[in-house]
Amino acid sequence: MECTDWFIDADTHVTEPGDVWTSRLSKKFQDAAPKMIRTDEGVDIWHFGSTERAIPVGATAMAGWPEPFPSFPKNLDECTAGAYDATSRLAYMDEIGAWAMALYPNVGGFGSETFLGLKDPELMLECVRAYNDWLIDWISPDPRRFIPVMATPFWDVEAAVKEIHRGRDLGHRAVLFTSAPQDFGMPFIGDDHWDPIWKAAQEVDLPISLHIGSGDFSDQLHNPAHFSAHGIAPTTVSTSMSILLTNGIQLMDVVMSGILPKNPDLRLVSVESGVGWIPFVKEALDHGFNYTRAYNEKPEFAKLPSEYILEQVWSCTLFEEYGIHTMLDDIGEDRVMFETDYPHPICLYGEEVREKIDAAFGGLSEASRKKILFSNAAELYGVPEPDRAWGGPSGDALT
């Protein structure tokens, strides 16, 4: 069955233009501000603190690029305009039928961890605030159709709480947080240290986004021996998939920590990690929970771990078909959202988007399709209903 309605894309990224920070930081920090520089070879890279980003800018915006990795656009001039320009993004959204898109960063890291490299706490906080201000400015061509996800200075809980409240007032719809703060020398996510974060998120009624790669995965991406032994493309595949699966491992830790039963209004989103592993994780956690009698140590658990996952954890599906076709009852259709990961290397792009939607969801009931493709995300992020019908891949919206 062909799906012809609008959908909401629960995970895309913005390729930040070079003046995000230089145009917003105070004069005091101009010299230390993160900067995009173009090398003598014409490659755009980010200079961030004392180091340069290992991945060039173009590697975050490969949508439409004709060659596979390790080939990528050298600079922003070669990237698809929708990666960094909001008006062009809206035109692309009309083309594929995406009524709204959630927006995640690149440069600051998928959990805001890159800011730690700046070393100066005052500068780090200014950079987070500048990014959050910039993202709200970026969506100004049509704020209804974007879901801005705010960065957080998680290394400073008090500052993070203040920024969560400020971000909600600005118009942000979700809070980006790291799944593995212990990777950066901080307490594990279930430690009481983080309780003010969960309280603030519930106070402002914003979900917490746990995006893949929000911990320290540098060893996985920069291992020449791995590339040499297995080849560039095979290593890229296995490394990318392992980062997706890491979210499942981290989510198990989050659930067993007791965060969810202690914070019944807290909503977590596992971003870009898929859904096919959820039935196994639910069953495994319940088995281990009962076997170890963990309820004796965790009296806050009034229900099984699997029940907290079903009630308080949303997840995003990208390329999967098997899990949607065979395990949707166990996964829980009320908590699944669709994503394309545009404009990243493994993203769905152009005609692929509708082809995947039809292949994965075409056989579902109309009610199930609407939940996964639109309603679940609309309710979670407060996205308004479309004011027109989608006109098909020509990009012409019907009035």
Image (cartoon, rainbow, N blue to C red):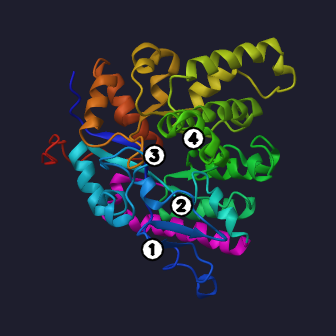
- Element assignment for label 4: helix
N-term mark: 1 or 3? 1
Residue shown at the point (75%, 52%) measured from the top left: 184
Residue 54 coordinates in the image, percent (x, y): 57, 58
**Which region is colored magenta?**
120-148
Pick the residue in front: 369 or 276: 276
Where does label 1 land, which residue? 40
Q: Are marks 1 and 2 in contact (CB under 8 Å)?
A: no
The mark closer to the camera, 2 or 3, is 2
- The quadrant of the rendering that contains the N terminus is top left
Residue shown at the point (42%, 48%) measured from the top left: 344
Relative to 305, 211 lies left or right: left
Where does label 2 land, which residue? 107
Residue 381: assigned label = 3
Furthest toward the front, the residue is: 228
Q: Label 3 sits on what residue type?
A: Tyr
| Helix, strand or loop for the magenta stretch, by majority | helix
Q: In which quadrant of the rendered view does residue 296 lie?
A: top right
The mark closer to the camera, 1 or 2, is 1
